[in-house]
Each structure stands twice: as C-alpha cells, then as structure tokens.
Image: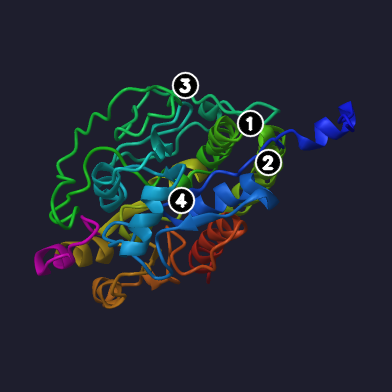
Amino acid sequence: MIRPTTLSLAFLAPVAAAAEVPRVVTDIPPVHSLVLQVLGDLGEAELLLETGGNAHTYQLRPSQARAVAQADLVFWIGPDLTPWLDRTLDGIGGSAKAVDLIGADGTFRREFGETGAHDHDAHGHDDDGHGDHGHDDHGHDDHGHDDDGHDHAGEDAHDHDHDHDHAEADGHDGHDHSGLDPHAWLDPANARTWLAVIAAELSAADPANAAAYAANAAAADAGIAALDTALAARLKTVADRPFTVFHDAYGYFAGHYGLTVAGSIALGDAAAPGAARLAELRAELAEGGVVCAFPEAQHDPALVLTVAEGTDVRIGGTLDPAGSTLPPGPGLYAALLTGMADTLIDCLDAG
C-alpha cells in the first residue's frame, strides 16, 4: 500500500479561505468617495443616493434596502442628514454594522446658526495626518447591529436634541435648522479624520488587508491635505465678501475657510420659503453688502432670482453640497470641494 507523504498530505488538507473584502454600503456621494479611496483595488462600495437625489428626502428602492440588509458595513453621516436610512437600519434584521461618521471621535461638529471661522488648529491634524479635534462626543446609535462585536468610538446612544422628528414620513417637514448641522463632510479636516475611521473599520472586518487599507487611507489623507492647502490660499481672496445660499448647508466649508455666509433663503431642507420670508430676504439684500446669491442643486433657482431681483446682488453658479450631480467615484470628494470653491470665487471675485 502506498502511504501518503507529508507533502501529499499538505495538498489534501483543507485550504484556508481567502480573505473576503466586506460588503460595504454608503449613504451619500462624498462618503462613497472616501470609502472607495480606502478600499482601493480591493473592493467596491454601493452608493445609495442616486445621481440627482436629495440627501434629506431620498427613498430607497427595495433592492437598495436589501443591499443594506446584506451589508457587512454601512458608512453614513448619521440620522440627522438621512433619516430614511436611519429608519431602514432600524427596520432590517441584518447584521450590518452602521458606522455613524459624524459621531466618530475627532470629528468637528457645529450647530446650525453658528457663524464665523473656526480655528483650523482645533482639528489637531499632525504631520502624520491623524486628527484629534478634541471636541465633545456626539455619540453613536448602534441600531442593534453590534452582534459582530465591533465597538464604535464613543459608544453612547445618540442624544438628538433637535426639533425635527425622524420618525415622520418625510423626515424634514417643518425642520427649522436648529441643533446639530450634519453637513460635516464639507470640512476637509473631518474627511481626513474619517479616512482613518473607515480604514480601522474595514481592517477590523478584514484583518488580512489591514495594511492595504491603512496605506490607502494615508495616501488619500495626503491628497486631501494638499487640496485643502491650495483651496485655502484661493478662497482667502474672497473671505470678506458676504454671500447668500439657498439653505444652511455651508457652515462647515465657510467656517473652515473663513468665508462670510450672510444667510440662507430656505430655513429648512424640504419646505420652500413663503412670501413673507422672500420679502424679508429681498429687503435684506437691498440694504447692500451681499455680493452674490447662489442657487442649489435639487432646488428651484427661480427663488434665488426672485430674492435678488431689484438688487445689485449677482447670481452665482449652482452649488451642490452633497455632490449629487457629480459622477460617483473616488475622485468625487476632491471634485466637490474644488467645484464649490470655483463656483464661489467665480462670482465673488467677478468685476
């Protein structure tokens, strides 16, 4: 009888399963872009908000809800921005871990209505690109998806001191923009912090590729840091020129770069301003000082034209804070910030 050799026994032994890249779902294009940069060539991530969709009021298709239920990781800003995803996470029975980026340690958070530039040094990014903003924790909502044993940084439940009710069907009806401002991705220092968070979560779910995730995150961090420096130099020339926006979504961008937002046309995310509000704004613009008014993607530009009518305020290009009209991909985040800076400068620096 031929006895198997040690070598032949090795071939007969079960082969260890290759590392499997986690199934990842993201909420909005900027988060999708950051996640793709960290994934690199290792995998893909599904983007829920489709081109042209409104981040605040989007409704998932059944296939997208299934993707969320089947995911290993869901990277999203948090329920203050996308209550529709919050309801989906609460309602599914899957094992996805929801990573609430705005609640991550080191994230700079602002309240609606805050004005003025914040201290860039508060972000605490040192030479290696890792941030420690030193701000109080907003906390995390685990959505009951912690069966995999992963811990969120600062694992407190969300304390929503906001006037809106995320359980309502349309989420933001009547929302008067008080409480936490969720548009935190428009501060590039937050994006740099989140790259490290994304890499850590992917590494915890896929330890075999941890080194690649870390390297990809470091490369992406360096790219955003360089872009940030370039944009800061360009935007400095228009920092003292007030402008009006469609809705209060630009506080992080304006605060980071020291820009002057004079106000917003709409007080909420979904409801159009009434006649009284438009009359009030027209009177404010007529008093002078405001240089430009900017329409916004997903909203009627006629309202901006109406408000600026009869004043010296210039109408700028359309701003798109969620990148909903840009081609999705790893380059979207840089394109979003660059496009926003270009649009602002084109109007504020004209004439």
> Which label's residue is closer to the chain start, 1 or 2?
2
Q: Which structural element holds mark 4?
A: strand
In front of the other: label 2 or label 3?
2
Dot 3 corresponds to which residue?
A: 134
Report crowding for label 2: few under 14, some 14 to 19, many 20 or more residues within 10 A (C-alpha). few
Above/below status of 351 relative to 19: below
Question: Is any atom of residue 289 visible in this view?
Answer: no
Dot 4 corresponds to which residue?
A: 25
Percent from the top left, x then y, of residue 202? 57, 37
- The amino acid type of the residue labelled 3 equals Gly
Q: Which structural element holds mark 1?
A: helix
Above/below status of 64 relative to 93: below
- The residue under the point 17% across, 49% down is 176
Q: Whole-Å distance between the Cαs marked 2 and 4?
A: 22 Å
- The amino acid type of the residue labelled 1 equals Pro
Above/below status of 154 relative to 43: above
Q: Whole-Å distance between the Cαs marked 1 and 4?
A: 19 Å
Q: Which structural element holds mark 3?
A: loop
- The residue under the point 19% across, 53% down is 171
